[in-house]
Amino acid sequence: MLVGAKIEVRGLEFLEPGRNYIFMSNHVSNLDPPVLIPVIPGRCSVLVKKELFRVPVFGTGMRLGELVPVDRGDRDSAIESIQLAVKVLRKGLHMVIYPEGTRSSDGRLLPFKKGPFHLAMDSGVPVLPVTMLGTYESWPKGRFALCPGTATVVFHPPIEPHDYTDRDALMDVVRDTIASALPAERRNEKNPEV
């Protein structure tokens, strides 16, 4: 239970002990990380927008935890972030990524950024798609108060990056997998990166 949110987990059987993964999830609420990360067995790093690293104490804690800063507006910096994330994955940590790059304001799946799929192809670490359900209803973007409810974490079977010829093909299958557990009205059609 997390501050009035009951947590249900489905699909833990897809996680092979001793193996690390890149967990890619839809992102609809600030509840998503504190619900998802504790239910993942093992130590996790996260790709985090670099602005959060400037927050005193919080930023230091993120550095010590080996979280990886991402500058979404600077391509060269984003490439450096991917290289740093590959190093973190090689240490055996899991990586949690929200490929939409930001929270959805209406609960619908947004276009995916390409950087996380470069990371998967470069590292060869399997992607484990995750669908978050119920967190939007409990705490959508723009609302101050948290409403009690049930947050459901759906782990899908892992996807091997080497099974795909390119980043776009991998991105399509990960997006389709995450969308498959969403209500139809929240799936959105595939659209290009913004």
Image (cartoon, rainbow, N blue to C red):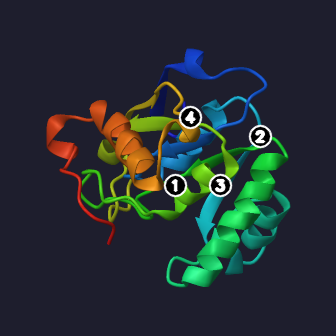
The kind of residue on which mark 1 rests is: Phe
Choose mark 2 or mark 3, whichever is in front. Answer: 3
Quarter-of-image position of residue 69: bottom right
Q: Could you tell me the amino acid type at mark 4?
A: Glu
> Label 2, label 3: how many angstroms apart (C-alpha)?
21 Å
The part of the image, by quadrant, that contains residue 145 is bottom left
Residue at left offset 69%, top offset 81%? 54
Q: Which residue is mark 3?
A: 122
- Sequence order check, earlier mark of 4 and 1: 1
Q: Quadrant of the N terminus?
A: top right
Q: Residue furthest front?
A: 165
Tell me, yes or no, whether the two marked residues, 3 and 4, touch with CB atoms within 8 Å: no
Is 62 above or below relative to 148? Answer: below
Q: Where is residue 116, by image quadrant? A: bottom right
Left or right: residue 100 compared with residue 46: left
Dot 3 amino acid type: Asp
Residue 83 seen in render: yes
Secondary element at tag 2 = loop
